[in-house]
Every structure is written in C-alpha cells, then in structure tokens.
Amino acid sequence: MVPTQKPLIVGNWKMQPASRARAVSLVKDVRAKIGKKDDVSVVVAPPFVYLDAVRTALGKNTSIALGVQDVSSEKPGAHTGQIALAMVRDFGVQYSIVGHSERRALGETDAMVNHKLQAIVKEGNIGIVCVGEKERDASGQYLTFLEGQIRSALQGIPKSRLDRIVVAYEPLWAIGTGVVATPADVHEIKLFIVRILSEMYGRTYAQRVRILYGGSVNAKNAQGLFTEGVVNGFLVGGASLKAEEFIGIIQAVR
Ligand code: PGA
C-alpha cells in the first residue's frame, strides 16, 4: 500500500533575493501566513549562504522544511566550491534539487545528475530531480528525450528508495517565461512519467515517486494545474519569492 501522499510545494529561490535581510523577511512572511496546518509539505530552497538565517527565522515549531538547489555527489574532501551531502544533512536539510535546467545549462550532465541522486537517496535525503524538454515537436521527439532523462537519472536507484524520489517535470519553455503548460499537457506528461517508472519498477513501486510540475506556476493557475494535471504538487521559482503568491499556491492545493 502506498501511504497517502500530501501535496508537496517547493520554493526554489534560485540566486535570490539579493540580501540576507530580504531572505529572512520573505521566509517570516511565508511562515506567518501558512498557519499551523501541515496538510501540505512545504519546502524552501534558499541560496546556501542564507540557510542558517532562514532556519533561525523559521524557528523550531515549523512545518516548513529546508531544501538546497544543488549538492555535490562527492564525500567531504578536496572539492573547491562544492557542498557535500553530509554537510547539508548535518545541517538539517531534507530535500535536494538535482538537475535543474539552469544547472544543466552550466554543464551538468545526465551522469552527474544520476550520481547526485544516488548519493542523495543513500544519505536519506529526498531528491527532487528536474526533467524537461527545451521545446516540443510535432513528431514527439521530446517524449523520447524526457524518457532518456528519467531513465538515466534513476539508473541504479533501488525500488526500496523510491519514496525518496520526486520527479519535477519542468519544460524549459515554461520556466520563468510566464508561458505555463496547460493542465492537459501536465496530465499527459504525468501519465507518461508513471508509465516509464512502472516499466522500470512495476506499478506499485512507481506510485511511490511523487511527480511535480514546474514552470510559471502562480496563485492563479495552480489549482487547475493541480486538479486537472493530477500532479503531487509544484516546484515554484519566481512566485516563491513573493509570500502572497507562494501562499496562494499552497492554498490552491489544499
Ligand atoms: P518559474 O521557475 O516558476 O519561475 O518558472 C520554476 C523553476 O525553475 O523551478
């Protein structure tokens, strides 16, 4: 039996806001408006240098979890500029985003994404792996591309660890553009992802993987995408930097 999964809303702050004071004020606003209900799993993924301040601002009695936008697959050692999984775990971070298209654009390969994801689930963290096509073509080549990204990312991940995997479908044409996928598009891709996971792991285990949509999600379009797209939640960029908007998205999935 698959336990009932709460909706999951992840705020990917990217390289924003520009100061720690603003990061703290943003998370305080979100916290204040979210109330005590914990019927939705909410995650914020600030830049590394704000993690400590954000954690302090959240305080102890919070249902908001911390995430990171990237993490190294290497063990602590001589890796200039990198942050090890052991460090983020030790800090109390539970979620790690991997393979965001903005990182892939900087050279992150499918193999690197796979290594990171393997390390994440092994350490007991939850990995949010981003997949998505650059553009759509009438012949459906983008589906082959997506399938390749998913199969490669999950290579070597045992079915016993699938509850630590979240797949975020983020078509590049929808990220930060204001052009959102239609709920029907989202539903179609969700079913497509479930089919691939079922082929890889069997239907029962496949259901343990949560599937999110990301790309220009806001408080207005969230409800339609959630109910008609039949996804487990959203990975939110721009709208996660405005407390009202982010809360609106959380309310929409309640
Ligand atoms: P967006 O970004 O919500 O600003 O489109 C989503 C993302 O990149 O995760």
Image: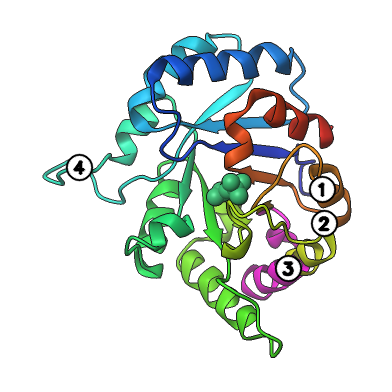
Residue drawn where x is 39% and y is 32% of the image: 89
Query: Could you tell me how far apart the alpha carbons at marks 1 and 4 are, in whole angstroms?
Result: 37 Å
Q: Decide which of 21, 116 is in the foreground and name it.
A: 21
* Residue at the spot of label 4: 81
Number of labels in the image equals 4
Q: Quadrant for residue 49, please give it.
A: top left
Query: Could you tell me how far apart the alpha carbons at marks 2 and 1 are, in whole angstroms?
Result: 5 Å
Q: Which comes sooner in the sequence, label 3 or label 2?
A: 3
Amino acid type at circle 4 is Gly
Q: Decide which of 61, 28 is in the foreground and name it.
A: 28
Q: Which comes sooner in the sequence, label 3 or label 1?
A: 3
| Whether residue 163 is visible | no
Under tag 1, what secondary structure? helix
* Residue at the spot of label 1: 226
Q: Residue furthest bottom?
A: 139
Q: Residues within 10 Å of mark 4 (few under 14, many from 20)?
A: few
Q: Which residues are magenta?
A: 191-211
Amino acid type at circle 3 is Ile
* Residue at the spot of label 3: 189
* Residue at the spot of label 2: 229
Q: Residues within 10 Å of mark 3 (few under 14, many from 20)?
A: many
Under tag 4, what secondary structure? loop
Q: Is mark 3 within 8 Å of ligand 1?
A: no
Q: Which comes sooner in the sequence, label 2 or label 4?
A: 4
